[in-house]
Amino acid sequence: MSLALETRSHRPLTTFGQLLARLHLDGILLAGLVGVMAIGLLAIYSAKGQQLPEVTGQLARMMVALAAMLLMAQVNPVWLRRVAPFAYVGGVLLLLLVLLAGEVGKGAQRWLNVGIRFQPSEIMKLAVPMALCALLHDRALPPRFPMLILMLMLIAVPVLMIAVQPDLGTAILITLSGVAVIFLAGIARRWIIAGIVLALAAMPALWLVMHDYQRSRVLTMFDPTSDPLGAGYHIIQSKIAIGSGGVFGKGWLNGTQGQLEFLPERSTDFIFAVIGEEFGLLGALLLLLLYLVVTARGLVIAVLAQDTFSRLMAGALSVTFFFYVFVNTAMVMGLLPVVGVPLPLVSAGGTSMVTLLAGFGILMSIHTHRKLVTR
């Protein structure tokens, strides 16, 4: 009798595992992503003034993003490697179209409207690392100097086109995704040092081409009180919210900075401050732990990958996801300038979430198609 009960109790787990395998989904990665999104729904309900339609709208966007993840998980990495150059070229052409005839909103020209309104820059978050990984697939690693220059040019073209929209946050993230591929390819230490020196040397030139509001954000990072009602307002209110949450938080829906609307962009870029205020240090650490689980699982998938393209792509997607989290949380805590980077899978919005989960679909595909990968 006990043996029968034990067998029956394990059957649902086996069935569920078989279902995940058939769908080419990774259980650990999926659990981490769903956990992050669940916290995001709680935070959005609070940040949006407890309006249920806002939550249902976000849930609908999550379903679309999960569908994109499921779709990408079915695609063999071999096919992804073959279409990577076409995705890159198509993305660059769309960015050019944005510069020529894109829609303007909030002082930026970032969108195309072809029945649906979308940002082509989101495509490049996947297309750039895919193209670089495909380029390195059949070549000896680490890449030699001519190949390194070519890779940097492939990164620079879309990054510059996005930066002039202007969208500095997305430009930075795409740069990081490309640099992650170069780093994971085993670039020599001397080139890493040279790159850091060149980046530091280019800072004055970058300062000259930055917009006035971007310079103001950099300066207020060091002293937000210099413009407490202007450029420093976001950081000041964010620090107040996080600090007032303490260890255990004020309780869900009980945050004053968020509920009384002192905190700007509380459902998008600064939603981490809402979580810190209402759930405290422990709640923020729980969210960061889930992010760590997702990143670590992605790196494990990269280590287990069978070919150069899959290994570099999985590693780049995982490291870039970590950069997304780091940039947003550091920005909210005043450690980096405000650059308009949403908190992954938590901030309200759909386009960024679809791109992220499509990337995780690629990660799952790399892991579950390992035995099917051919040269």
Image: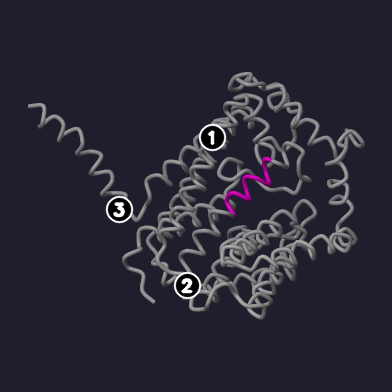
* Mark 1 or mark 3, earlier in chain: 3
In the rendered image, the quadrant that contains the C terminus is bottom left
Q: Residues within 10 Å of mark 3 (few under 14, many from 20)?
A: few
Residue drawn at the location 59% of the way across and 55% of the way down: 320
Farthest-out residue, bottom:
146
Compared with 261, 337 (above or below) is below
In the rendered image, the vertical position of residue 250 relative to residue 99, given as above or below: above
Q: Secondary structure at mark 2?
A: helix
Q: Is residue 327 magenta?
A: yes
Q: Residues within 10 Å of mark 1 (few under 14, many from 20)?
A: many
Write down the residue under mark 2: 81
User: Up-down: is 215 above or below 374?
Assistant: above
Dividing the picture into quarters, in which one does residue 145 lie? Answer: bottom right
Q: How is the image coloured?
A: one colour
In the picture, the disc for residue 21 is 3
In the displayed structure image, the side of residue 304 where residue 372 appears, left or right: left
Residue that lies at the very extreme toward the right in this rendered image? 226
- 123 within the magenta span: no
Dot 1 falls on a residue whose secondary structure is: helix
Q: Residue at x 88, y 47 (%)?
A: 216
* Alpha carbon separation for disc pair 3 and 2: 22 Å
Q: Which residues are magenta?
A: 320-329
The answer for how far apart the CA atoms under marks 1 and 3 are is 27 Å
Residue 226 against residue 196 in the figure, above or below? above
Q: Quadrant of residue 366?
A: bottom left
Q: Measured from the top left, where is residue 1 in percent x and y?
A: 7, 27
Residue that badge 1 annotates: 41
